[in-house]
Image (cartoon, helix red, strand yellow):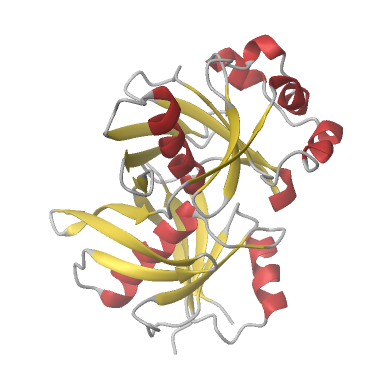
Amino acid sequence: MERRFYLLDVFAEGQYSGNQLAVFRNASLLREEDLSRLAREVHFSETAFILSDEPRGGGYDVRVFTPAHEIPFSGHAVLGAGWVLQRELIEEPLNTIRVNLGVGPVDVNFAYHYGGIDSVWVTHRAPEFGSMLQPQEVGPVLGLSLSELEDRWPIQEVSTGLPFLMVPLTSLAAMRRARIIPDAYANLGTLTEARALYLFTPEAYNPENDYNVRMFAPDYGIAEDPATGAGAGCLAAYVLRYLRPTTGTLDLRIEQGYEARRPSLLFARARRDEHGARVSVGGRVVMVAQGHFV
């Protein structure tokens, strides 16, 4: 049984950009505490563990840990795990692989270019919209004035497997100023189940992109994430509902990680269906290093 690990850059336009990810293969014999310790040892925003090279029930079992604890869903961890399964294990150009997560099975899809994987996509669960918060409840958490929070759209919980609090901002200047105020953040738990704040503005560094975003999740051990696949799916569903309510389908280019000096590019799609919306998120994956673990 080959016990290998891979260091990847996900949502990367080149090596050493995007969001770092460690993927471990054949991790089923590791104890729960070992999975947590490895995630803390790597100390990326998330670490993916493929439990076995053998599929179960038509899919591959994957668990995802942050440095703080296990989470049921992560877009970039699923994309990276799917990329490893396709490129390092299956080695034939399949269109879709199923991955079994804490939230249930999700499909990972592949686009190819000249025989190699060009981009990887994950189909999210149907988006769920939760509680709305008031600007005066969120502004102090981010150290922002009320005028820097965009009042045309709501501050609202959205989840496609992991809940985020979507926070629209007025400009890149407001985005750059945002930071977590610890005491105010601690009080946020009394107002919302979402422990990750996902900030966005239509103003972007690269004019080809649709939105600039930042994500803070101190409770997950993530001070700031350079790319957030789960959050990008929530943003696509949010935009379809509030910013483009007459649009049937949309394709978004989402930039993230500029303040963290890890520029990332995430692709997101959303289309209306009988459940409200169908969302998928994609990006490119680059190998950085690989090796064996004990």
Q: Residue 91: x, y in percent?
A: 24, 73
Q: Residue at x 55, y 14 (%)?
A: 170
Where does the C terminus fall, quadrant-wise? Answer: bottom right
Q: Residue furthest front?
A: 274
Q: Residue at x 42, y 31 (%)?
A: 241
Q: Nearer the viewer, residue 107 or 92?
A: 107
Q: Nearer the viewer, residue 142 or 206?
A: 142
Q: Image quadrant of residue 171?
A: top right
Above or below for 137 versus 81:
above
Q: Residue at x 75, y 20 (%)?
A: 136
Is any part of residue 30 visible from this angle?
yes
Q: How many marks?
A: 0
Above or below for 194 versus 95:
above
Q: Residue 114: x, y in percent?
A: 12, 54
Above or below for 176 versus 190:
above
Is any part of residue 260 visible from this angle?
no
Q: Residue 292: x, y in percent?
A: 50, 77
Q: Nearer the viewer, residue 238 or 32?
A: 238
Q: Residue furthest bottom?
A: 1
Q: Residue at x 27, y 76 (%)?
A: 90
Specify whether 200 is left or right of 1.
right
Q: Image quadrant of residue 44?
A: bottom right
Q: Nearer the viewer, residue 38 or 126?
A: 126
Where does the N terminus fall, quadrant-wise? Answer: bottom left
Q: Residue 21: x, y in percent?
A: 51, 56
